[in-house]
Amino acid sequence: MNSFGRIFRVHIFGESHGPSVGVTIDGCPPGVSLTEEDFIKDLERRKGGVQKGTTPRKEDDKPIFLTGVFNNKTTGAPLTILFNNSNVRSSDYEKQQAIPRPGHADFVAWKKFGGFQDYRGGGHFSGRLTVCLVAAGVVAKKILDLTPNPSPKERGTNPGYLTNTAGQWQTVSGYAKENRQGATEAEEILWQELRNRKINGCKFRRQHPVEGYIPDFICLDKKLVVEVDGSYHDTEEQRKLDEERTKFFGANGYREIRFTNDEVLNQLPVVLQKLKEALSSEATLNEGNQALPSEAILNEGNEALSFGEGLGEVQINASIIEIGGEKNIEAGLQKAIDAKDSVGGIIECTVNGLPIGLGEPFFDSVESLISHAVFAIPAIKGIEFGAGFNAAKMFGSEHNDSIIDESGQTATNYAGGIVGGITNGNPIVFRVVAKPTSSTPKEQESWNRETNKIDKFSVKGRHDLCIALRVPPVLEAITAMVILDMMLVHQATTGKSHH
């Protein structure tokens, strides 16, 4: 009833004005580094009282790790995280409890639970509990981000692409993450061409640590390193470092191909042709040399985080595309302010970097699972994938996404990255509708259960002008939970990491 997921299982609890709200996650692997700082960014995005149009209720939202974390690492036991409720004003609700608020769950909760429900602030139905969803999403994102290395099965006896020690792996992979976030324009352009096996069906990883080095791109199967160099590579000092790097990779059976930023930006077709030729060739520098040292393995805790080919490249982003019927967010909010009312909005979410093959036909389709989880977000009233409801206005020949290469890339993406309930390697794209906040200062009418009459009233308390403003981090969290659980289920049921 209050849980979701098959392997990465999330359970939320608490009430809006109770002592705390919280989340328990079962199936969290051991060895995940987890500190309070990991939660700050997404929790701040969700907070009320931070941006225009949100509730003035402010909570510290500092995560309290009750179980499942020891020495800043997950233990593998159920992970329980609490968030204290300290800024509450229950008196606002005591005065109006006899009148169920329209649009809220007051009436159905009273009927279902026989009057024993906690009515303060919406109780267990409150959007306050989305802080628990965001926390679960932080953990899910962290696990996805910590898994750019091949699975133990992929490594076999040739762990050549891992760093020497678990500690070094954590340190260097941290630098790699920073490099990905600070990628140059040329690197981003080339990555869009390399990702999802677009060239010769070959899998590339971006900023993947190899010993103490972090190549821009690497194809482990073909042992090919691709570098995109800026002007600083022309300096004498950098040339020497590049020579050492090339010697290291060559000594371990890797080929290296280098391009300048200008070449990628201005001669991309030539760059891609050279890459195709390099990937088609089986020749290697220093052919016959062994891969990197066999002692380069992860400890047991970190091996538990390995789910296959570069989950660290999964990117989930949600953004508001419409408020109150307006594409301009400020204009939509002003419309609500002028009307002294609330407004809703539309939020779009994209997921890039997913492999082909996640999800199942029918009941466990990707759409089914995402939709199931999405409707756990209070105020969500609709969802559409790809072209969505506009598909009803299209011809079949127009709606069909033409496949243009062996990686499965399509010319259009009206399917939203999902066909037959299964990911097809293209970005997942879906949109959700958040209704106008039900609590509005406008005078309304509702039935009074004590007098059995229709009364006029206005809702008191602190509420969002537009709840959609706080949905993006919650939507990302929900999506991360679903994606991670699908990946774990796929590996458990097939015995394979994703491909």
Image (tube, rainbow, N blue to C red):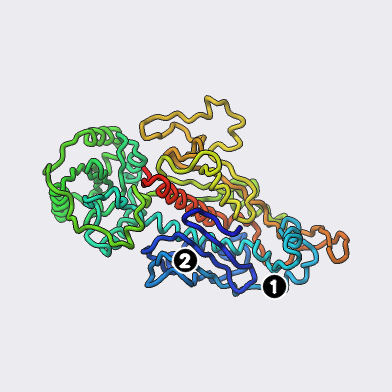
Q: Locate the C terminus by quadrant.
A: top left
Compare residues 299 and 396 and report the one nearer the observer. 299
Element marked by disc 2: strand
Compare residues 2 and 43 and report the one nearer the observer. 2
Q: Is residue 234 above or below residue 449?
A: above
Q: Earlier in the sequence, mark 2 or mark 1?
A: 2
Q: Locate the N terminus by quadrant.
A: bottom right
Task: Give residue 440's quadrant in the image.
Answer: bottom right
In the rendered structure, the answer to whether residue 384 lies left or right of residue 264 reads right
Q: Name the residue under label 1.
A: 90
Residue 468 drawn at (x, y percent)? 60, 54
In the rendered structure, the answer to whether residue 454 lies left or right of residue 258 reads right
Residue 365 drawn at (x, y percent)? 52, 42
Give, as a three-letter code, the residue at label 2.
Answer: Leu
Q: Name the residue under label 2.
A: 79
Residue 194 drawn at (x, y percent)? 32, 40
Other-residue count near label 2 (Cα within 10 Å), few / some / many at <14 / 14–19 / ≥20 = many
Element marked by disc 1: loop
As measured in the structure, the alpha-carbon distance from the residue carrying label 2 to the one carrying label 1 is: 30 Å
